Image: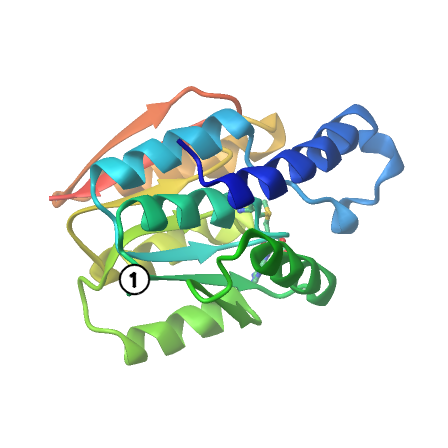
Amino acid sequence: MIDEKIQHVLSRLEKDIDYETEHLGETPSEKRLNCISKNIGMFYNILLKSINAKNILEIGMSVGYSGLWFADALMSNKQLNGQIITIDREEFKIDSARQNFEEAGVESLIKIRKGEARKILHEIKNEFNENYFDFIFIDADKESYIEYFDLCLPLVRKGGIIGADNILFPERFNEMMSDYLSHVRSKSNVQSVTIPIDNGEEVTIKL
Ligand SMILES: C[S@@+](CC[C@H](N)C(=O)[O-])C[C@H]1O[C@@H](n2cnc3c(N)ncnc32)[C@H](O)[C@@H]1O
């Protein structure tokens, strides 16, 4: 079901993620992995298989846990000339993600872009045609979600999906997430719903 090599790395990372969750106070916030849950990974994996996704953009990569779920979907879709572009600004997370992608055998599918998401998104806007991406995942600094959504909406194809994490939890983000939901749902060319799995996902289709 999930590629064996990818599953092996996912399982190893899940042990690190579980340890972090159980010992939250011991890890300084800037060192936390803050990955999506296994359920959410599986959810997006199924969604990406169902829309036959080929080109994916992720804002907020961390150590590549979510990226591995996306890569498995591309492989299953036989979209081997597709790609995942994923953004992060933290060197130590990028080093770790690179090793994880290599160990899972998916490094050729995934292009890591290092730097500030806002700046890189503007570059991507210039490099790629509108409607290029089948799926865009927003999972970086919560205060910028609305700005990221507005930059991403032209980049996603009709029938493509924008996913956003942390809609329900942690609760300290609730106000910002409520603003995000109002913003997204005010657009006439999208349809959007909150999926209440674990931290909560907003799943938005471009009509
Ligand atoms: C929640 S984690 C991503 C988790 C990842 N999507 C997963 O589930 O495996 C958020 C990541 O976004 C990165 N980040 C936050 N703000 C950023 C920004 N403005 N530009 C680039 N990266 C950023 C952080 O370094 C962190 O690794």
Residue 1 spot, x, y in % from top left: 39, 31
Question: Can see residue 167?
Answer: no
Image quadrant where residue 28 sits: top right
Question: Can see residue 166?
Answer: yes
Residue 19 spot, x, y in % from top left: 78, 30
Depth check, front residue: 57 or 97: 97
Depth check, front residue: 135 or 205: 135
Quadrant the C terminus occupies: top left
Image quadrant where residue 10 sits: top right
Q: Is residue 28 above or below residue 117?
A: above
Q: What's the residue type where badge 1 is placed?
A: Gly
Q: Residue at position x 74%, y 44% from top?
A: 32
- Image side of residue 69 versus residue 11, left or right: left
Q: Residue at position x 35%, y 44% from top?
A: 73
Residue 6 spot, x, y in % from top left: 53, 44
Depth check, front residue: 97 or 81: 81
Q: Is residue 6 above or below residue 126?
A: above
- Image side of residue 41 versus residue 61, left or right: left
Q: Is mark 1 within 8 Å of ligand 1?
A: no
Residue 36 spot, x, y in % from top left: 55, 36
* Residue highlighted by disc 1: 82
- Image side of residue 5 versus residue 95, left or right: left
Q: Residue furthest front?
A: 4
- Image side of residue 126 versus residue 95, left or right: left
Q: Secondary structure at mark 1?
A: loop
Q: Residue at position x 43%, y 55% from top?
A: 58
Q: Residue furthest right?
A: 26
